[in-house]
Amino acid sequence: MTDRIPRLTVAHYSGLLASLIGAALIAAPLWTDEPGVLPAAGIILFAVVNWATDALPPHITALILFLFSAVFAIAPPDIVFSGFHASATWLVFGGFVISVAVHRSGLGARMVQALMIHLPGRYLMMAGGLAIAGMLLSFIMPSASGRAVMMAPLAVALADQLGFHENTRARHGLVLAAGWGTTVPAFGILPSNVVNMAFVGAAEGIHGIGFTYFGYTFLNYPVVGFLGAMIVIPLIAILFGAKPEPRGKAPLQTQWSSAERRLMGIMLIALALWMTDSLHGTSPAWIALGAALLCVTPGIGILPASVFSKDINYGAWLFVAGVIGMGAIANHSGLGGTMGDWLLANVPLTKDGGIVTFYEIFAISAAVGMVTTFPAAPPIVTSFSDAIAQATGWPLQSVLLAQVPSWMIYPFPHEAPPVAMAMAVGGVPMREGFRLLSVYFVFGVLIILPLQYFWGRLLGVYL
């Protein structure tokens, strides 16, 4: 019996084309005076296309990114491998261990049973419940990555309870609901994401402009945040929904097991520390790592030490490190700033153009975010916002705030690392995330952005 040769798909051809273009750009030092920017553009193009299409497994793409960036000196090794000492990567590592503990202890099944008691057994309601729970956490827990790591195991446990097996779209949709709900609406709540605070810090440091919690949140959360969620939830049900078919299982015991009590204690301590990180200054990543170590500590935890070699998805962990490293490469090479300068020089900005100007600012910010990811994009766009203000006739504060919707309406999962983290913990392929986000991107551009513009006009912001 002979092995069948896998048939090439559109994704494979897309990955091959991106590889060829990327290779040409990596060779740019041979024929250009700008050796840094073009090679960085080449390796980033390769990574973005392959992550979006799953032409290669995400961790293989990340390893190729590391290899070529180091071998061809696209960036120094400490930049290329910066993802491995980034707190977000270790937050995901801790999240993997916590996820295994939640599953094995039975705590996940107990939490899911409680959720199912209060929600009708329909896919739409379950996905909506996860997304809304993540949105509510955004008001009390300031770390999007921490929220994603908490919600993804719950989504996986819920999928198991509803009979959605691994590698099924219904399961992927629930994880995406949790990841999207914990991250994207929170871009509209001032202190709820690192991206928001990076933007506020850059605006104040570069231009001397500050924003209040109420003013920022009242502008960005109602339309792009809340209304966006009301569109994403049914969209997930349409793209991923299936009829729940729970398998026969024993009823949930009323008595808590010792493992459940110990894990609940660990989780409550971690949650309290996550919620108060502004007071003690400890990164959410180290809190998650500490919780993970407690889970394997004899006499306290509930997992054997072998969980690190048998149950951790290191492929997904490498992918997260690759996403962070890619953003660092873009920043180090100056690609983001170069791209912004090129856009300013070649995209005709409309003077006093109203909604046209609003769309132009969105497009510029979205293009920069696609290359650099959102933690890095706001400071880059903020740095040349005064040039946009002069070209469009808009007040500088209006230009600054007009970039915010581009963090909430985007097509590629890697652009918002917490969403990618939830997908990694939940085992969701990148192509499924791209499938949801690209469709929502179309809805966002056609429906959400006009509504956001007129809402901002009503508040006197977009002038």
Image (spheres, grey):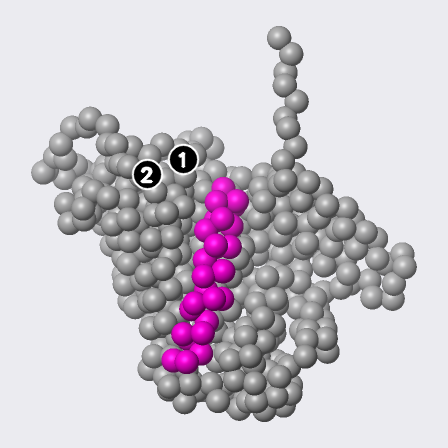
| Callout 1 crowding tier (Cα within 10 Å): few <14, some 14–19, many ≥20 | few
The 10 Å Cα crowd at callout 2, few under 14, some 14 to 19, many 20 or more, is: some
Q: Which residues are magenta?
A: 429-455
Which amino acid, by three-letter code, is at mark 2? Ala
Alpha carbon distance from label 2 to label 1: 10 Å
- Tell me which corner region of the image, top left, top right, bottom left or bottom right, holds residue 170: top left
Measuring from the top left, give residue 147's x and y in whole percent.
35, 57
Q: Which residue is mark 1?
A: 168
Q: Does residue 64 appear anywhere in the picture?
A: yes
Circle 2 sits on which residue?
242
Please say whether residue 314 is one of the residues in the magenta stretch: no
Q: Nearer the viewer, residue 427 or 328?
A: 427
User: What's under tag 1, amino acid-wise?
Assistant: Thr
Front-lying residue, 204 or 165: 165
In the visual, does 255 lie left or right of 355? left
Position of residue 106 in the picture relative to residue 351 (left or right): left
Residue 74 image point, x, y percent: 75, 57
Q: Which of the two marks, 2 or 1, is nearer to us in this view?
A: 2
Residue 431: horizontal and vertical position, in percent? 52, 44
User: In the figure, 256 relative to 198: above or below?
Assistant: above
Residue that protrudes farthest toward the left in the picture: 254
Quadrant for the N terminus in the image: top right
Q: Are marks 2 and 1 in contact (CB under 8 Å)?
A: yes
Q: Earlier in the sequence, mark 2 or mark 1?
A: 1
Choose between 128 and 327: the one closer to the eye.
Answer: 128
Looking at the picture, does residue 306 appear above or below residue 195? above
Identity of the residue drawn at 61% across and 55% down: 325
